[in-house]
């Protein structure tokens, strides 16, 4: 088992949507980039939804995403996990991210989207109770873009993720 730590969030002052994953996988950690695994559909989906070139340099994709007022982060700041699968996270090792602090600093956030069921479950278990009443925030669970979530076609994932623009 390895201790792993997430990245800092990516956001601008005007972000209205926060996309939360669980914890970067080994490919992402090695490259220090969100969703770096070549089979992860995140950037392809984001490209189709927001007209961002998924093949552009990572820094360019990040700029384009923040120009759309979208922020990225993870529910977990740190944990112990073997490999990349969320199912391998040792529950007792979980250190949640400071989402309350993020929301206090980014009051423009109106929606939190979860990239997969584990991100949503861990948010509700470890973070939601720490938040002040945020009645203005909508929560949107979305299917995981991970290659481990192969039971759903790309087209069905894309259709679900299109709701992020509504």
Image (cartoon, rainbow, N blue to C red):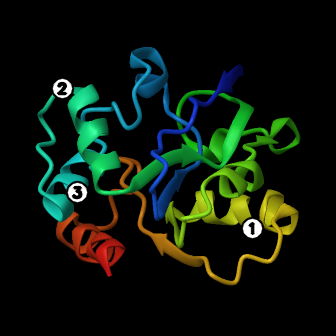
Residue matched to label 3? 45
Residue 122 x %, y %: 72, 58
Check whether the beta carbons of the residues at disc 2 and disc 3 lie within 8 A of each other: no
Q: Which residue is mark 1?
A: 124
Mark 3 secondary-structure assignment: helix
The alpha-carbon separation of the residues under discs 2 and 1 comes to 34 Å
Q: Residue at x 69, y 84 (%)?
A: 135
Residues 6 and 150: in front is 6
Residue depth check, mark 2 versus mark 3: number of the one nearer the observer: 2
In the rendered image, which quarter is residue 131 located in? bottom right
Across and down, in percent, residue 20 comes to 54, 54
Q: Position of residue 50 (x, y in %)?
A: 19, 60
Residue 112 circle label: none
Image point 41% across, 35% down: which residue?
34
Residue 24 seen anywhere in this rendered image of the structure: yes
Q: Which one is in front, 123 or 156?
A: 123
User: Which label sits in the foreground, 2 or 1?
Assistant: 2
The single residue placed furthest to the top in the displayed view is 30
């Amino acid at each position: 088992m390895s201790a792993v730590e997430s990245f800092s969030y990516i956001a601008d002052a005007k972000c209205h949507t926060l996309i939360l994953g669980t914890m970067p996988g080994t490919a992402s950690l090695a490259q220090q980039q969100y969703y770096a695994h070549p089979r992860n559909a995140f950037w392809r989906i984001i490209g189709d939804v927001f007209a961002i070139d998924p093949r552009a340099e990572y820094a360019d994709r990040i700029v384009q995403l923040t120009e759309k007022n979208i922020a990225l982060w993870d529910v977990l700041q740190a944990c112990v996990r073997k490999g990349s699968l969320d199912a391998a996270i040792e529950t007792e090792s979980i250190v949640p991210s400071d989402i309350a602090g993020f929301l206090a600093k980014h009051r423009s956030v109106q929606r939190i989207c979860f990239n997969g069921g584990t991100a949503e479950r861990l948010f509700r278990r470890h973070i939601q109770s720490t938040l002040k009443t945020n009645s203005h925030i909508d929560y949107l669970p979305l299917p995981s873009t991970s290659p481990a979530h192969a039971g759903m076609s790309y087209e069905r994932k894309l259709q679900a993720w299109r709701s992020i623009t509504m």
